[in-house]
Image (cartoon, helix red, strand yellow):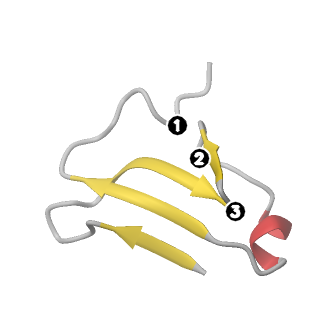
Amino acid sequence: MIVAKNVSRKNKYIQSAVLNGEKLDHFYFPASELLKGGELILEMGDTPNKAWGVVK
């Protein structure tokens, strides 16, 4: 299941993400995790969170 909290036409940027209860610091994860019946929760906002999803 994929849940996008606070999503709207204005709030189209991911602020944070949680996969199966674990916070994601990046925008990628194994698809197999979601296919197992997991849950991806995306918190959305109106401006890009430039600190989230950045590969360092």
- Label whose residue precedes the other's in the sequence (2 or 1): 2
Quarter of the C terminus within the rendering: top right
- Which label is found at residue 20? 3
Counting from the top left corner in percent of width and height, residue 33 is at 81, 66
Q: Taking 15 as reference, is 8 left or right?
A: left
Dot 3 crowding, Cα within 10 Å, few <14, some 14–19, many 20+? some
Q: Is residue 14 left or right of residue 55?
A: left
Percent position (x, y) of residue 42? 45, 60
Task: Locate residue 48, reporting x and y percent.
Answer: 29, 41
Q: CA distance from mark 2 to mark 1?
A: 5 Å
Local SS, label 1: loop
Amino acid type assigned to the residue bearing label 1 in the image: Gly
- Check contact, mark 2 vs mark 1: CB within 8 A: yes
Which kind of residue does numbered mark 3 sit on?
Asn
Q: Position of residue 51 (x, y in %)?
A: 42, 26
Q: Residue at label 1?
A: 53
In the rendering, which numbered label is found on residue 27? 2
